[in-house]
Image (tube, helix red, strand yellow):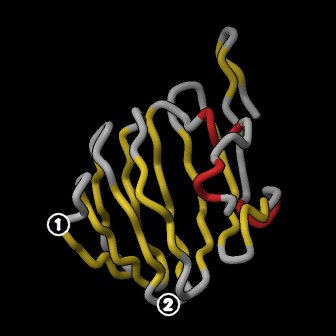
Amino acid sequence: MSTTGERSVTWYAWDQMPKENVSTMLDRRLITGDRMMLAHVYLKKGCIVPKHQHENEQLTYILEGALRFWIGEDESEEVVVHAGEVLHIPSMVFHKAEALEDTLDVDIFDPPRQDWLNKTDAYLRK
């Protein structure tokens, strides 16, 4: 694409991005910039994302389907996020999720998830 000085603009198409099979229930595609990560996460109905926390601020935007989230170390807060809705998860907040149906969500992280990039996200690979 174009460059301005040493900075360049990059164009992506989701269907041309490699799809990583993380588990039998979860696949994803990643686009990473200098300070942000954008992910398409494909969850099959019944997929559980175990309770975890991370330094990364997260926005989860549901394109198709629905996810139930449990928030907090004690999982005391529960919220269902449907297609067209967004959940903001601040840094270091514990959360767990379950796909209530086949779901496509867009996750945005700041900074990028290094554990996803170097595949050390064992909590997802069970």
- The count of marks equals 2
Horizontal relation, residue 64 to residue 71: left or right: right
User: Which labelled disc corresponds to residue 26?
Assistant: none
User: Which labelled disc corresponds to residue 101?
Assistant: 2
Q: Is the Cβ of the residue at disc 1 closer than 8 Å to that at disc 2?
A: no
Q: In the rendered image of this protein, does residue 72 appear above or below residue 21?
A: above
**Quarter holding the N terminus?**
top right
- Furthest residue in direction top, as rendered: 5
Question: Percent from the top left, x then y, of residue 17?
Answer: 79, 56
Question: Percent from the top left, x then y, of residue 19?
Answer: 78, 62
Residue 86, quarter of picture: bottom left
Residue 123, quarter of picture: bottom right
Kind of element beneath mark 1: strand
In this view, the residue in front, 1 or 21, is: 21
Say which amino acid is labelled 2: Glu
Residue 93, quarter of picture: top left
Horizontal relation, residue 76 to residue 46: left or right: left
Question: Percent from the top left, x then y, of residue 29?
Answer: 70, 57
Point 55% across, 88% down: residue: 45
In this view, the residue in front, 14 or 5, is: 14
Horizontal relation, residue 34 to residue 111: left or right: right
Badge 2: residue crowd in 10 Å (few <14, some 14–19, many ≥20): some
Q: Mark 1 or 2 closer to N-term?
A: 1
Question: Which mark lies nearer to you, 1 or 2?
Answer: 1
Say which amino acid is labelled 1: Glu
Q: Which residue is mark 1?
A: 77
Q: In the rendered image of this protein, does residue 33 appear above or below residue 30?
A: above
